[in-house]
Each structure stands twice: as C-alpha cells, then as structure tokens.
Amino acid sequence: MFNQLQPVPTDPILGLMTEYKADNNPKKVDLSVGVYKNEQGDTPVLAAVKKAEEYRLNNEQSKAYLGMAGDVRFNEAMTNLLFGEHDVVKSGRVKTAQTPGGTGSLRVAAEFIARCNPTAKVWVTNPTWANHISIFNAAGLQVEEFPYFDFDTMGLKFDQTVETLSKVPAGDIVLLHACCHNPSGMDLNLEQWQTVADIAKQQGFTILIDSAYQGFGEGLNEDAAGLRLLASQVEEMIVCSSCSKNFGLYRDRIGAISIIGTDPAKAEIAFSVALGVIRAIYSMPPAHGADIVATILSSQELTSLWHQELDEMRTRINGLRSFVVDKFKEKGVPGNFDFIAKQNGMFSFLGIDKESIATLKKDYSIYIVGSSRVNVAGVNDSNADYLADALAKVLNK
Ligand code: PMP
C-alpha cells in the first residue's frame, strides 16, 4: 500500500533550519525561521511563562478531559485580548475555542468554511505565509490570490487589492493578516482597513483574520485595531489567533478560533459546527499552553510582567529595523533599504536575487529564505557587521 508513495519535499524554511543546525561555521547567521531571537540569538522562555508554569506545577488538580472548546478561562482571556471592550463581546456575538496553535486554528477554520460552503474560494494576499495555501487546500478548498505586496516599491499595491476584492463574490472568504504581515511586513493602515470593510459589506464575502503577531507590531491594542474595526461593521467573521510569538509558546501549540455571528443564537450554532470539526480532528486541545496563558492574563502581576517582556521584544525588533537600514548604508550595501524601517513585525523581503541568496549561504553561512524574506530578529550586534559586509560583497559583484 505504501509502495506507490512519492516523498513530499521538505518545507523550504524548515529544511534551511536543519542545514543551519548542521553548519559548523562559527559566524553562521540564521535569518530564516520565524521565531523571535534576543540579542544573544536565543529564544528563551518568558519569565511570565516560567512563573505561570511553576504555579501550574503546584496547583494543577486534574488531567481529566477539558472538552472540545478547551480551557474556558483561556477562551475568555483570548476573546478580551483580541477584541477588548468590543460590542461583539458585550452582545455575545463572538464565541472562542482553544486550538493547537494558530495552524490548528486555521485548519479548524478551513474545515468549518468547507461545511458552510464547500465551493468557497479562499482569497489570500500575494504573497502570503506558504502554509495558508496548504491548510485550505487540505480541506478541499480552492485558494486564490489577490494583489497585495509590490516588489517594485517594496510597499502595498492597494489600488490593485481594491480592484480584485471588489470582484470577490458572497460565499467566498478573504484572508487578511491582522498585523505584521508574513512574509512582507507591510500592514494595512486604518483607512485601508475601512476600505476593505466597505468592500466586504458591498460584496458580502466573509473575512477571516489571521492574528499571529499581536503585540509585535505597534502594541496589543494597535495591532488589533484593524480586526476590531471590521468586527464592528460586518455581520460574520472568523479570527484565527496564535500565542506562539507573543507568549513565546511556539512548541506548546496554543491558539484560538473566534467566530462572530449575526446574533448570539447564530454564533452559538456556528460554534457548535466548529466544535464538531474539532471533535473529528483531535477531539480536544492540549491543556498546558492554555493554562499558562490564562494564568498570566488572570493575574495583574503576571500580566504586567508579560507586557514588559512583550514590549521588550517589540522594541528590539523595531530598533533593529532602523539599525539594519543604517548598517547597510554604512557598509555600502547597494540599493535603498529604507522600507525595512517602515514595516512591522519580524519579516521583510530584502528583494535580492536567488543567486545572491545561494552565495550568502554557500560562502558566508548566512541563511535567508529563497523569496529573500528575512527575520529581522535574527540580527544582533555581533553579526550585523558580518551580515552587511557579506551583503555588500555579494551584491556589488
Ligand atoms: N499565521 C501566520 C501568518 C504565521 O506566520 C504563523 C507562524 N509562522 C502561523 C499562522 C501559525 O503559528 P503557530 O505556530 O501558532 O501554528
């Protein structure tokens, strides 16, 4: 039965991670994988998480099943983190379930959408996080792209975004990144979010928001402003969120799916369908990460410690963005990289060619994804000169 199988190619980013680990060059630089790194190049466990884990170790009462929706405290805390004091929360129009990471959330959303409308097309930004396409295809849904990032200006192609979205019909899904767009770092401003809301109302398509980096762009509330604006104006919406980055809980697999319905009764019905989807995939999510997040968010002391640590991560990333631009100028890297300082989150495209990316890996052990996407958080004081010198040499050839 297995004999006719063909091997599935390694995920290009995870493949680079393996190559990086095996590389013995002491000067190696990893700008590929999307995890936050501190000045020492490490991804440590947050202090707030350690404290919550200690509390859990001493106070956990039972490991009996939690149920399909997971941890109720977590679901409430995530709803508040995403929507704040929003009308959709007060009116009971939003229902949230814990999921295994943002990926798990998107997969549940994909199956849920397939149950709502098996012929729905899912419209994603060009480019988008590559796994979006695999996740929706896996649920049997067709994925279409709409123009978003402009490699000529290293900014948005918003006119073309509007043009394409204005033709998307009711019954289809439009997927937007809440903030810190992966891979481009280019986010919509509030005026552009409003334009999208207007088109969604006019066309009747459904918005799905992927919120994987809340707090990494401008701040917890600022990064949710676009999704909150939409939630005020559309009748139905799905939000998939992840605690991988902002709580540093990557491998603990913790995220959530929130479904907004036209009214509380319709939200409840939609939620029951999502729970049915969950039951048939993994039955219920693992408890650990949700308990950690719920413990942090229900304690004033731990919440303020987490805010402090999140601010530190965001400030470092934003500082690095300007630092990298200045360093590239100082070292004579050809081209204008000012756009890096204007973008959000960990990622930006350098806009360099594949041959240069290959040379950077082969000759300098600098690991960059083939699309030229870099994780800015991989830069630090000890590798910035080496990186900029290498780029100047390779690009000035
Ligand atoms: N959405 C986007 C845009 C992402 O970049 C990621 C992580 N790379 C995810 C979702 C999924 O995150 P998780 O690790 O929580 O599954």
Image (cartoon, helix red, strand yellow):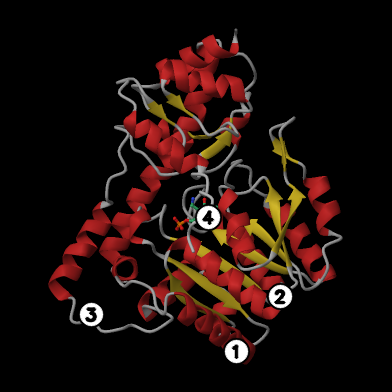
Q: Secondary structure at mark 1?
A: helix
Comes first in the chain, label 1 or label 4: 4
Mark nearer the viewer, 2 or 3: 2
Comes first in the chain, label 3 or label 1: 3
Residue 323 in the image: above or below residue 232:
above
Mark nearer the viewer, 3 or 1: 3
Q: Which percent across, then down, holds residue 370?
A: 57, 32
Mark 1 and mark 4: Cα distance apart in space: 40 Å
Point 79% across, 50% down: residue: 161
Q: Which percent across, then down, holds residue 281?
A: 47, 75
- Determine crowd level at label 2: few under 14, some 14-19, many 20+ residues with C-alpha closer than 10 A: some
Mark nearer the viewer, 1 or 4: 4
The tag on residue 118 is 2
Q: Is residue 50 left or right of residue 130?
A: left
Can you identify the residue that label 3 sits on? 63
- Determine crowd level at label 4: few under 14, some 14-19, many 20+ residues with C-alpha closer than 10 A: few
Can you identify the residue that label 4 sits on? 5
Task: Single out the residue that lies furthest toward the top.
Answer: 397
Q: Secondary structure at mark 2?
A: loop
| Amino acid on which the number 4 mark rests in the picture | Leu
Q: Is residue 323 left or right of residue 18?
A: right
Image quadrant containing the C terminus:
top right
Q: Which percent across, then down, holds residue 359?
A: 52, 18
Comes first in the chain, label 1 or label 2: 2
